[in-house]
Image: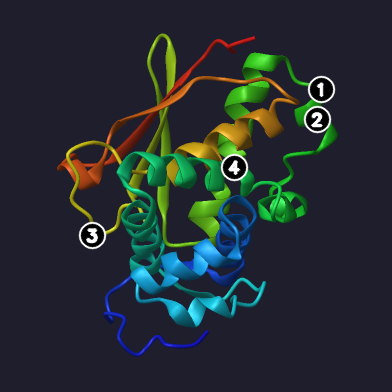
Amino acid sequence: MADLNNVPSNTYFYPNRIGRVILQSMDEIMGEASVKQVLEAADLEHLNRKPAGNLAKEIPFEWVSALQAATEEVYGVKAGRSHNHKVGRNCLNTGLREFDPILGVADLPIRLMPLGMKFRVGLDVFSRLFNNFSDQVVRLSSTDKHILWIIERCPVCWGRQSDTPCCQLATGILEEAIFWGTGGRRYRVEETACIATGDENCVFQIDKRPLD
């Protein structure tokens, strides 16, 4: 992957495939002309040539975070965060499902589980995508009413400061992953803590009961 010369030596990475998926999803949601504006604002014009679809870890967290901030700059904060959320939801369709043979989300035993068990097991399996193939660190916890998706090392807000949680890309990815993994059920997902606001971790609160 090009233009890694200015990346700090102690940074963390996504694999090229996830970076490519994010950029393809941006094209579909925003249009190529707007994405070029975002890349220019983020000083990432070299990403007009998308990375390869391999698993080499060459997409620095700084780039992922810069894309989120630049989208807010180009569209305004409210509209930009809405676009980042839509991009996240679209990432499943633009390629994250390609990890399925490795992760086993569509394996028959998972599909036959009761909804509640399938919900939790599906999240466990999906967390492997990030923990095994990237430098993002995810763990799960729970309360009486919620599953907590906790990102201890978050690329989406890496190095950012914000008054409110700003990981809309991650929220969208998580919403759509749950929808896919449960066979079409929607659950409310809310980011309740964010490293960019000074919290220790980015925490996403997922209702245990589906919306439908």
Q: CA distance from mark 2 to mark 3?
A: 40 Å
Residue 145 figure quarter: top left
Q: Residue 55 placed where, x, y %?
A: 61, 71
Dot 1 falls on a residue whose secondary structure is loop
Indicate the amino acid at tag 1: Leu
Q: Residue 97 placed where, x, y %?
A: 72, 49
- Reading the image, the residue beneath label 4 is 126
Q: CA distance from mark 1 to mark 2?
A: 5 Å
Q: Earlier in the sequence, mark 2 or mark 3?
A: 2
Residue 147 figure quarter: top left
Along the line of sight, the residue nearer the viewer: 72 or 134: 72
- Reading the image, the residue beneath label 1 is 112
Q: CA distance from mark 4 to mark 2?
A: 15 Å
Crowding around mark 2 (Cα neighbors within 10 Å: few <14, some 14 to 19, many 20+) is: few
Indicate the amino acid at tag 3: Gly
Foreground mark, 4 or 2, reads: 4
Quarter that holds the C terminus: top right
Which circle marks residue 159 in the picture? Answer: 3
Left or right: 113 with respect to 150? right
Q: Earlier in the sequence, mark 4 or mark 2?
A: 2
Q: How many marks?
A: 4
Q: Evaluate if marks 1 and 2 touch, with contact meaning CB atoms under 8 Å apart.
A: yes
Q: Evaluate if marks 1 and 4 touch, with contact meaning CB atoms under 8 Å apart.
A: no
- Reading the image, the residue beneath label 2 is 109
